[in-house]
Image (cartoon, grey):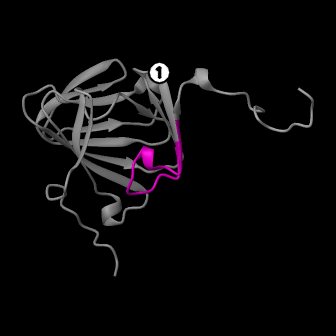
Amino acid sequence: MAKKPIANMFEEELRPWKKGSRFEAGLARLGAKIGAERLGAQYHVVPAGKTAFPRHAHHNNEEMLIVMSGTGEYQAGDEVWPVRAGDVIAAPAGDGGSAHQMRNNSDADLKYLVVSTRNDPDVVEYADSNKFAVASRVPSDKGLMGAKLVFIGRMESAVDYWDGEDTGEEE
């Protein structure tokens, strides 16, 4: 039997996501659930005063955020805009200079849907912590950390191209 191509984001069980006192959200992956292959979709419920994810930019994927209810603010690069229910927001692929983040600066839940391309592999820059992630073969029902190959680090930890290779030369 084929996968049902319909899911109701408001009825899906939210997976808790939390780190420290700043980052928190309830998340429901929808793309894989309905059989989407080249598009991802995830419903976010962010409590008052919290942020779902660190400010980041995808080099190979773009995202569209659709605010379902609540208010907050959206940052892209150095600019910040207020957002509210009904707003549709673009987060095109880019580099650290275009890093984006949605924040709930209100006293009620901020609920929004994120629809994204699923171009694999992807490089993600985290502008505030000066790190990057490389991910390849990300399963459709998982995020970055579920990738077959994932590396998170900083440029300073890079090794030389020939590091560890038997080049046939004496060191």
Location of residue 42 in the rendering, given as x and y in whole percent from the top left corner: 28, 50
Location of residue 160 in the rendering, given as x and y in whole percent from the top left corner: 73, 27
Q: Residue at x 30, y 19 (%)?
A: 79
Please state if 65 lies on the left or on the right of 155 as rendered: left
Q: Nearer the viewer, residue 163 or 51?
A: 163
Please state if 166 lies on the left or on the right of 118 as rendered: right
Q: Which residue does the numbered mark 1 point to in the structure image?
A: 130
Location of residue 166 in the rendering, given as x and y in whole percent from the top left corner: 84, 39
Please state if 80 lies on the left or on the right of 116 as rendered: left
The disc labelled 1 sits on which kind of residue?
Answer: Asn
- Would you identify the image quadrant in which residue 67 lies? top left
Relative vertical location of residue 149 with respect to residue 165 in this rendering, above or below: below
Sort mark 1 into few (<14), some (14-19) or many (20+) by Cα contacts within 10 Å.
Answer: few
Relative vertical location of residue 149 with respect to residue 33 in this rendering, above or below: above
Magenta stretch?
135-151
**Is 148 covered by the magenta stretch?**
yes
Relative vertical location of residue 125 with respect to residue 29 in this rendering, above or below: above
How many numbered markers are drawn?
1
- Would you identify the image quadrant in which residue 73 lies? top left
Secondary structure, mark 1, is loop
